[in-house]
Image (cartoon, grey):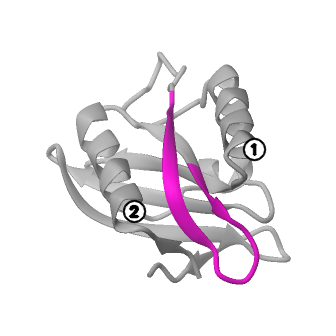
Amino acid sequence: MIKFDAPAKQQMIVIGEKGYPHEICGLMFGKGGGERTVTEVFECGNLNKLKPETRYDMDPKDYMRGEALARQKGLDVLGIFHSHPDHPDKASETDRQAAWPGFSYVIMSIQKGKFASMKSWVLNDQTQFDEEPIC
């Protein structure tokens, strides 16, 4: 299960709506362990210029900056969020292939520029995605 502080969840939604019609991406910070709660989000650039409406390539420099910022604040990187403009919040095969064990992958469905829903996904022992409850 992954939980969200209300301001972090709202910031993530704002980033998703602002980036429409392109996929956006970013990192989720918080404390790891049993009670995983996202307390902050960090927006990263999408370097995909060929199909930015259906794919994201997270800027590695942004990832490194975000990871350093989380460490500086005494937080952990809990996972990655991104949007699916005008598509469901279901993880794609491309999402699964790029996923890392131990991370939560939150996908927001942004329909016509407005937040519609979100789901979180984690890799299981067979490297397939399982839906993770969100609180």
User: Could you tell me which residue is drawn at 49 percent across and 48 percent down?
Assistant: 41
Task: Please count the marks in the image.
Answer: 2
**Residue at numbered disc 2:** 89
- Find out whether residue 33 is within the magenta segment: yes
User: Could you tell me which residue is drawn at 27 percent across and 45 percent down?
Assistant: 14
Q: Residue furthest top?
A: 49
Q: Please state, as top left, top right, bottom left or bottom right, where the C terminus lies in the image.
A: bottom left
| Tag shown at residue 71 | 1
Q: Residues within 10 Å of mark 1 (few under 14, many from 20)?
A: few
Q: Is residue 102 left or right of residue 75?
A: right
Viewer can see residue 21: no
Q: Quadrant of residue 132?
A: bottom right
Main secondary structure along the magenta-highlighted residues: strand
Residue 124, image x and y in percent? 77, 76
Q: Residue furthest front?
A: 73
Residue 3's place in the image compared with 47, above or below, is below
Q: Is residue 49 left or right of residue 112?
A: right
Nearest the viewer among 105 and 130 is: 105
Q: Is residue 77 left or right of residue 10?
A: right
Residue 65's place in the image compared with 95, above or below, is above
- Residue range in magenta is 28-44
Q: Of the residues shown, which amino acid type is indicated by label 1?
A: Arg
Nearest the viewer among 74 and 20 is: 74
